Amino acid sequence: MLLGDVRKPDGAPYRIEDIVAWAAERGEALSAASLSRHRTNHLLPALGAALEAQQVMEAIGQATGRQMSLQAAFTNVLIHKLLRYLETFDPSEIDPKAVGRMLETGVRAVTASLQLEKAERVFSKDQAAMMAEKVERRLAARNLDPETLATIRQEIYGLGVGEL
C-alpha cells in the first residue's frame, strides 16, 4: 500500500490517510507521520537497494553474457559482505557466538549458491537436449546420417549420445 502496489477498486493509489483509517478499522493505532517515516526510512531505501541490485545483475549479464538469477545475486552479495566484514573485524570486540552464526550463514549461502548453479546447469542441459531432439528430427527427416547427428549433439549441444 505504501509503495503504491495495491490500489483502490477504482484504480487510485491509497493515500497515507487511507492506510491510517484502514489500520484503525482493524484496531491498530497508526499516525500519518509514523507511516511517512517508515516509508522514507525503510521502504524506499529497500526498494532503491533492490533496483540497484537489479541494475548490477543486468550489467554483469551484459559484461559476461550470462544472466544471473536474483537468488544467485543475493547469495553473492551476502557472501561478499560477509567476507569483507571478516577481513576487517577485531576478534576481541565481538561475541564469538555471533561470528559463529555469521560463518554458518556464509556456509549456507555458499551451499545455496552451489545448488543454484547446479540447478541452472541441469536446466540448461535439459533445454539443450530438447533443442537437440527437435533439430535431430528435422535433420533426420532430410536423411542426414547418424554420425553427423551424433557430432552435432556432442559439439554443438555438448550432449553425449544417450542424453535425450
Image (spheres, rainbow, N blue to C red):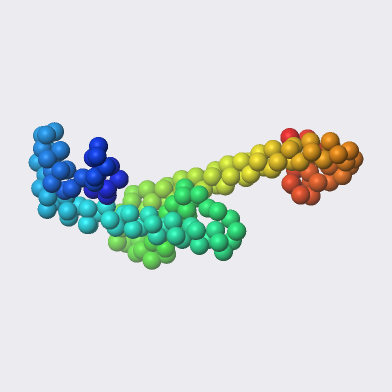
Q: Residue at x 42, y 57 (%)?
A: 53
Q: Which residue is drawn at 33% across and 51% down?
A: 98
Give the percent coordinates (x, y) of residue 85. 39, 61
Tell me if I can see residue 106 in this picture: yes
Q: Residue 78, located in which quarter of the rendered image?
A: bottom left
Give the percent coordinates (x, y) of residue 32. 12, 50
Give the percent coordinates (x, y) of residue 7. 26, 42
Q: Residue 77, located in which quarter of the rendered image?
A: bottom left
Q: In this view, does 123 lie to the left or right of 70?
A: right
Q: Say which quadrant the N terminus sits in.
A: top left
Q: Pick whichever, 108 or 4, lies toward us.
A: 4
Q: Is residue 36 left or right of residue 75?
A: left
In this rendering, the answer to whether 38 lies above or below 10 is below
Q: Residue at x 38, y 54 (%)?
A: 50
Tell me if I can see residue 129 in this picture: no
Q: Residue at x 28, y 56 (%)?
A: 44
Q: Say which quadrant the C terminus sits in.
A: top right
In the displayed orientation, state which residue is furthest to the bottom: 88
In the displayed orientation, state which residue is furthest to the front: 10
Q: Is residue 73 left or right of residue 8?
A: right
Q: In this view, does 7 lie to the left or right of 71?
A: left
Give the percent coordinates (x, y) of residue 62. 55, 61
